Image: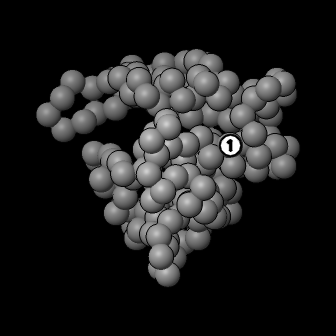
Amino acid sequence: MTNVTPFRNVKHASMLWAAPDRAEEIATLHAKLFNPAWDAAAIKSFLEHPAATSLIAVAGGQKKSVIGFLIGQLAADEAEILSVGVSPDWQRVGLATGLLEGLVRAARRGDAKRVFLEVAEDNAAGIALYRKLGFVEAGRRKRYYERPGTTPVDALTLVLNLDAPDNAG
């Protein structure tokens, strides 16, 4: 993208470990992106879990706002991405890629062999991003995503094998 305005330039964002005290901000952004949304208590619970490996992207002036998040966990030799989202104002400038690459680096440091995630089969942008980073389909959950007022959508289970060369991070 060549016409990225300075306030939307990924270079103006910082990636940080997500701490439980940011749960409310993450929940607010999650609600803008997902239906049904996770509440702050659920997000705080994920972030406080010993296996939590979660990141936020922040930008702004003195009080930096959460503009993106990745909630993940690392257990044994596997990592799982539970949710990832970027503020609509910051989409398509590389933030999701940065968050995903950060999780992959953490997973490698934790000796994970694979990273898993699920994505709705109608999420073309997400699927394209994951495939670009090396994720491949490992399974399907029929009618997994139930959204109010719509027909349920299958979930694709994707995996990134970290033993393979040239994978994210």
Quarter holding residue 143: top left
Question: Does residue 21 appear to the left or right of 104 in the view shown?
Answer: left
Secondary-structure class at tag 1 = helix
Residue at 75% in and 29% down: 167
**Residue 156 at what x, y percent from top left?**
48, 23
Residue at 56% in and 60% down: 13
Question: Does residue 128 appear to the left or right of 74 in the view shown?
Answer: left
Q: In which quadrant of the rendered image does the C terminus lie?
A: top right
**Residue 69 vertical placement versus 120 (above, below):** below
Please identify the residue farthest to the left as the structure is shown: 149
| Residue 76 or residue 123, whichever sits in front | 123
Question: Does residue 15 appear to the left or right of 7 in the view shown?
Answer: right
**Residue 141 at what x, y percent from top left?**
45, 22
**Residue 91 at what x, y percent from top left?**
43, 44
| Residue 14 or residue 52, whichever sits in front | 14
Q: Amino acid at mark 1?
A: Glu
| Residue 86 or residue 104, whichever sits in front | 86
Residue at 27% in and 26% down: 152
| Residue 28 or residue 78, whichever sits in front | 28
Disc 1 marks which residue?
101
Label 1: how many Cα within 10 Å (few below 14, some 14–19, many 20+): some
Question: Does residue 49 appear to the left or right of 62 in the view shown?
Answer: right
**Residue 27 at what x, y percent from top left?**
38, 62
Residue at 46% in and 46% down: 4
Quarter holding residue 146: top left
Residue 43 can be seen, yes or no? yes
Number of marks present in the image shown: 1
Scheme by which the image is coloured: one colour
**Residue 6 vertical placement versus 18 (above, below):** above
